[in-house]
Amino acid sequence: MIRSLSAVALTGAVALTLVGCGSDKSSDPAPTDKISGTVTVFAAASLTETFTELGKQFEAAHPGVEVVYSFGASSALAQQIEQGAPVDVFASAAPKNMQQVVDAGDITATPVTFVRNRLEIAVPKGNPGHITGLADFGKTEPKIALCAEQVPCGAAAKSVFEVAGVHPQPDTREADVKAVLTKVTLGEVDAALVYRTDVEAAGDKVEGIDFPEADKAINDYPVAPLAKAPNSAAAAAFVEFVRSDRARTVFTKAGFDNP
């Protein structure tokens, strides 16, 4: 049974650097009985739905293994790892946060980019704020929600605003992309910038608006096992599974791009 850990319960702060990640993928891994126990995965909040589904598939393929997740802002998760959190696998929404963990010596394997994601404007159903594009984020009238700039979705938003020449006027900045999306689904804001996959996951609770500048800030998602993973065999198997053709089907359906 998949369990989730509370990312809030662990301390988190932010430091960002860059990393280059590979992009090759593997075919479907064969089921094996050689791994067992718990595999603890720290993953970006935007991976919540896809990783939860993949966790169920992974457990079915490996009887005796339990996947435990902690979802949150990649920057906060990276710091928790640096502070000694017992983690087997880290999946980040940005190479910068992965490099933070690499530089700390907590990851010695080469991180691999397994998916890509891009931003999309999310508005409440019916678009009550009459949002038409990115320029509306520079106006004072609409209520706007953005991610904090130090987390991947906030850093990506900053990039697209710079490209578009828009000076955003956010009414709130949130700790991760799911918190931003919640502001939209509750009708507390007229618009927000979230990932395209989050708009897909929200279903008919929100509407998505594409904008051309999103192509200028596509996020690469790297994954890697931790150097001191408590369950190194399960960690390696989980990373391989995330890169498999079977996992690719789940990611594509959710709206992620191939690396």
Image: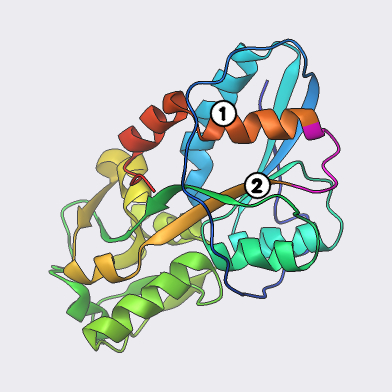
Q: Residue 136, how many percent across, how many down?
A: 20, 78
Check if mark 2's residue and mark 1's residue have beta carbons within 8 Å: no
Give the magenta-colored segment's residue range: 226-232
Tag 2 secondary structure: strand
* Image quarter of residue 70: top right
Residue 3 visible in the shown view? no
Q: Residue at x 76, y 41 (%)?
A: 88
Q: Residue at x 40, y 52 (%)?
A: 116
Q: Residue at x 86, y 38 (%)?
A: 230
- How far apart are the two marked residues, 2 and 1, measured between alpha carbons? 12 Å
Circle 2 Cα neighbour tier, 10 Å, few/some/many (<14 / 14–19 / ≥20): many
Q: Which residue is tagged 2? A: 224
Mark earlier in primary sequence (2, 1) = 2
Q: Name the one closer to the observer, 153 or 230.
A: 230
- Determine if the magenta segment contains residue 164: no
Q: Which residue is tagged 1? A: 241
Q: Residue 102, how many percent across, how many down?
A: 72, 62
